[in-house]
Image: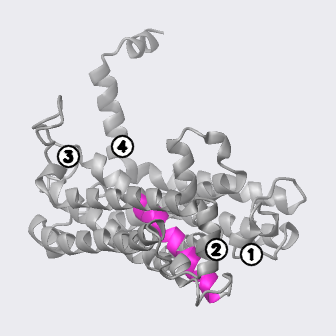
């Protein structure tokens, strides 16, 4: 009873330090978190495979035209997905358990890689990025069941990849928290990261501007890359004004990427009253950049897939409506690389291993 009371009245700083220690120990529990998420989702697909209602993918999707399994129903698709997620959960558990196992590490890493490629390339699509706008507008009811499941699938396989990273560090003697070994890699040094990170930032800024150019042209009355018929239809529905507004938001967001290599991305500028001169928390830049990188990559993969499978009408005449999105994976990879370089530059001395 006394222990419970002491815990309840513990100072906020003590409770915060406990959370910090828990986060610092993520290599110890991330594999179990991945196992739990994948196992539960595997059970959900088992339920759907046995005839349960609410299956969110394939022909049962509210918008099956976006799905890689447009013509595949629950009875055929759900058993395969159940097997895949349950297999992934088994791999996650093996990655989490200490000691050596009969299953080679390369096989476990390959399972993780296959899982993330399969989910990003087939189950997830651009609706994750589109529904982000609803979140900002506080229209949570507009987010549909399929998108919720896409988010859970992406999060689950992402945990599996991180579990594989933690396992690789543990078995090679590197620090589980920061990844540093006794001999640091040259490319992860702050100086080297500054060089290749700057190149990544330039690419991450340029790609969305290419996309935005087409939308701005339409709003200004130039049907760049689309037929006159399609342009007139969009003009009547005021789609091009809305498209230009969204493109402008994306372009402004891409300019924020410059903060990953500029001083104002490390120290709050003078005009930010109350924050001026203070250090920018690294997570404030790394987390949003990583999430955007993931979402635009998923969206770009979907556009590439639909082009390859003939999912668009008049792709040659209306190339401006769909081709610019196919280079989004370049944007996503570049943005992820820029965020990684920013992390390498700002991570400092590791609180676990003391390496810096």
Q: Earlier in the sequence, mark 4 or mark 1?
A: 4
Does residue 134 show up magenta in the picture? no
Quote the CA–CA distance across marks 1 and 3. 46 Å
Query: Disc 3 on helix, strand or loop?
Result: loop
Q: Residue at x 52, y 50 (%)?
A: 133
Q: Do residues under tags 2 and 1 come within 8 Å of each other at their CB atoms?
A: yes
**N-terminal of the two: label 3 or label 2?**
2
Q: Are marks 3 and 2 in contact (CB under 8 Å)?
A: no
Q: Which badge, 1 or 3, comes first in the chain's sequence?
A: 1
Front-lying residue, 119 or 166 = 119
Which residue was labeled with disc 4? Answer: 23
Spatial CA span between label 4 and label 1: 38 Å
Q: Which mark is residue 122?
A: 2
Looking at the image, residue 64 sits to the left or right of residue 324; the answer is right
Categorize mark 1 by other alpha carbons within 10 Å: few (<14), some (14-19), many (20+). some
Residue 351 is marked as 3
């Amino acid at each position: 009873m006394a222990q419970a009371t002491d815990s309840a009245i513990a100072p906020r700083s003590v409770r915060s330090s406990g959370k910090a220690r828990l986060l610092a120990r993520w290599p110890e529990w991330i594999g179990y978190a991945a196992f739990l998420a994948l196992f539960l989702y595997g059970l959900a697909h088992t339920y759907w495979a046995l005839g349960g209602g609410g299956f969110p993918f394939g022909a049962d999707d509210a918008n099956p035209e976006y799905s890689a399994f447009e013509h595949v129903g629950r009875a055929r698709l759900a058993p395969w997905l159940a097997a895949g997620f349950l297999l992934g959960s088994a791999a996650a558990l093996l990655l989490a358990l200490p000691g050596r196992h009969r299953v080679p590490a390369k096989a476990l890493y390959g399972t993780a890689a296959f899982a993330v490629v399969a989910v990003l390339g087939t189950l997830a699509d651009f609706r994750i990025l589109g529904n982000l706008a609803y979140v900002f507008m506080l229209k949570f009811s507009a987010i549909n069941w399929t998108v919720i499941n896409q988010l859970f699938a992406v999060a689950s396989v992402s945990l599996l990849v991180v579990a594989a990273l933690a396992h690789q560090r543990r078995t090679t003697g590197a620090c589980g928290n920061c990844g540093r070994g006794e001999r640091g890699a040259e490319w992860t040094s702050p100086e080297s990261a500054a060089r290749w990170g700057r190149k990544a930032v330039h690419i991450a800024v340029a790609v969305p501007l290419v996309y935005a150019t087409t939308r701005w042209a339409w709003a200004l009355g130039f049907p760049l890359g689309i037929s006159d018929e399609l342009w007139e239809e969009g003009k009547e529905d005021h789609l091009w004004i809305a498209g230009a507004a969204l493109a402008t938001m994306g372009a402004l967001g891409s300019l924020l990427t410059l903060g990953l290599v500029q001083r104002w991305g490390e120290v709050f500028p003078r005009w930010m009253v109350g924050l001026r001169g203070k250090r920018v928390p690294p997570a404030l830049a790394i987390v949003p950049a990583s999430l955007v990188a993931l979402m635009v990559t998923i969206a770009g993969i979907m556009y590439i897939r639909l082009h390859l499978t003939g999912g668009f009408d008049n792709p040659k005449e209306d190339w401006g409506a769909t081709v610019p999105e196919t280079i989004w994976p370049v944007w996503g990879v570049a943005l992820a690389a820029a965020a990684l370089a920013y992390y390498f530059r700002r991570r400092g001395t590791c609180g676990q291993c003391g390496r810096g």
